[in-house]
Image: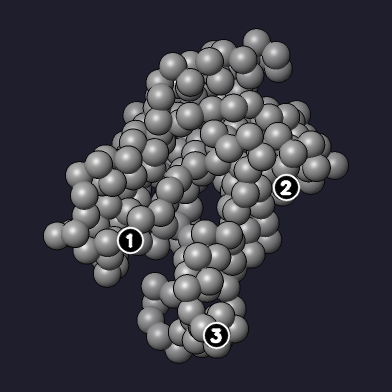
Amino acid sequence: MGRLNDKIAIVTGGASGLGAGIAQRFVEEGALTIITDINPEGEAVAKRLGAEFLTQDVSAESSWVDTIDEVVSRFGRLDVLVNNAGIFSSSPVDETQLEDWQRVMDVNLTGVFLGCKHAVRAMKKNTGLTRGSIVNLSSVVGLRGQLGGAAYGASKGGVRLLTKTVALENAAISIRCNSIHPGIIDTPILDPIFAAVDDPAALRRQIEQKLPIGYMGDPARDIGNMAVFLATDESIYITGAEMVVDGGMTIGLP
């Protein structure tokens, strides 16, 4: 029996990377999983995994209203929301263009706010010991500074504190909200970095040597499993928590 049997779950940004890994584990654990993404390739990913797919722009409130309404109309309720959709940026604060800053905030922070807002509204209609679980993807950069992380770090730090507020506001009605803070995970977001160097294998070894655990994380095994735990009733007494999944990255160099 799957750990998420009978759960109705949305995973945003599920077309690739962490979202696809999380969705894979949700399906494997029995959840009726809806992948959403602005990228139409998400439909093929959903079909491969045995999930549903909806096109969604997380930065637009109307898109959130349509998505939640569609899920509740088709499947009866929403039990789990994983706010995973996000974009990466890397530039020093004095070189960051306002439009780039705003785009990162629109997707990474406003998108999570809108997801929390409309998921809570839907989950309040649920009954039972637990009404719902919201899992927000932050980052280790949301816990500390990072060179070139002006916009990205600020957005992920915002997700961290937004998560705690949502958890506090809804603890008494059994809607939980927690954040996951991944370290360096082996996803396509790293492809441009490796493509920009002459020896990608050497760069990979260099990165892994700086991680106490000695290798980069896997989207499904490492982040997906944590998301599954937070989505299940196994974590019913956990809310407002920061789950750091970084191979020891934030405790220091090996």
**Where does residue 166 sit, x and y in percent of width and height?**
37, 33
* Tags 1 and 2 touching, CB below 8 Å: no
Secondary structure under tag 2 reads helix
- Which is closer to the viewer, label 3 or label 2? 3
Label 2 CA crowd tier, 10 Å (few <14, some 14–19, many 20+): many
Question: Is there any visible trace of residue 59 in the rendered image?
Answer: yes
- Which residue is denoted by mark 1 in the rendering? 90
| Rendered position, 133 above or below 90 | above
Q: Quadrant of residue 159?
A: top left
Question: Is there any visible trace of residue 231 in the rendered image?
Answer: no
Secondary structure under tag 1 reads loop
Secondary structure under tag 3 reads loop
| Rendered position, 99 above or below 67 | below
- Which residue is denoted by mark 2 in the rendering? 24
* Residue at screen point 80% across, 42% down: 48
Give the label on residue 199, or none. Answer: 3
**Where does residue 51 sit, x and y in percent of width and height?**
75, 34
The N terminus sits in image quarter: top right
Left or right for 87, reference 67: left
Q: Which residue type carries mark 2?
A: Gln
The C terminus sits in image quarter: bottom left
Q: Quadrant of residue 148?
A: bottom left
* Residue at screen point 66% across, 38% down: 42
Q: Which residue type carries mark 3?
A: Asp
Q: Which residue type carries mark 1?
A: Ser
